[in-house]
Amino acid sequence: MMKYDKLTSITIEKLHQDFEKTGYIAEDDIIVPVYLALRLEKPILITGAPGVGKTEIAKVLASVFKTDLIRLQCYEGLDENKALYEWNYQRQLIKIQLIKETASEEMVEQDLFSRDYLLERPLLRAIQAPKKTVLLIDEIDKTDEEFEAFLFEVLSDFQVSIPELGTIVANFIPMVVLTNNGERELSDGLKRRCVYLYIDFPSIEKELKIIKVKVPEVGDRLAEDIAVAVHYMRHQLDFKKKPSISETLDLSNALVLFGAKRLEPEHIKRTINLLLKDKEDIDMFNKELGPDGLIEKISRR
């Protein structure tokens, strides 16, 4: 594993090896954009369907470089204060009660707006960190355009202005990972500041490798059956939510518990709720294909 201060000596080959050591199976289509983002010290914007491993890349980077992962989970209504900083109003009120009779109003104000009363949110925490960290901005597409505009200004300069304290400049530019599920179109301004990476659902061969790494107890034939079945379901049926990689692994672990050697219709009946998380999807699967139909389809491969 590498330390964060060795970024200048990082190579694509070493990064690939370290990703594999953490159990993240990735080829050059993923490793090269990550490598470029690290070397150029630019954020990486990772787009793809839920469950393809976007967020996991930030966790892997924190593990590989032995540093902290700071996560900003985005949601509708997220604003600058919740992402950057807030004042600890409760502590300030208590302090006012304690000193209002013994200190001047000017002294009180100076004291109340010091760092002691500052609540760091993820963006400020990453900027003020005493070492290079990984900053994960998860599901950026859930925020509105105003927050996005604020964000790409922060990501341009890696500094923030707090009226009461002045400008705070990052000691270390964090490794920034933004994830995007594609719920809305992101601005060109944000895209320009990032290295772009699109992650699709894996091929059968890649998912088979993932299953073997993450669930080593599964047999070779069963692992292949699972990878082929999930691949067929994703690409041949129009689900509202396609099975993710993590759901493939849930199925694999469940079938190990059942002692399965091959994927059988009865297994599908008992575990379909691990793959599909929407009643309409389950109903459509049973109507258009069903457990027997799925096993028939994958047996022809």
Image (cartoon, rainbow, N blue to C red):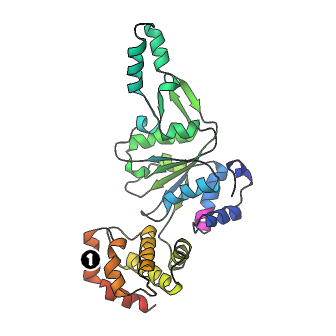
For the point 49% across and 46% down, which residue is it? Answer: 189
Q: Quadrant of the N terminus?
A: bottom right
**What range of the chain is rendered magenta?**
27-31
What amino acid is labelled 1 in the image?
Answer: Met
Q: Nearer the viewer, residue 197 or 102?
A: 102
Q: Is residue 123 left or right of residue 33?
A: left
Q: Is residue 253 left or right of residue 206?
A: left
Magenta highlight on residue 90: no
Q: Position of residue 286 (x, y in %)?
A: 27, 81
Q: Is residue 257 left or right of residue 66?
A: left
Name the magenta segment's main secondary structure: helix
Q: Nearer the viewer, residue 216 or 80?
A: 216
For the point 40% across and 40% down, which residue is it? Answer: 146
Give above or below for 30 relative to 232. above
For the point 49% across and 41% down, which residue is it? Answer: 122
For the point 41% across and 37% down, which residue is it? Answer: 82
Q: Nearer the viewer, residue 153 or 265?
A: 265
Q: Nearer the viewer, residue 110 or 178?
A: 110
Q: Position of residue 124 (x, y in %)?
A: 52, 36
Q: Which residue is identified by label 1?
A: 284
Q: Is residue 115 left or right of residue 130?
A: left
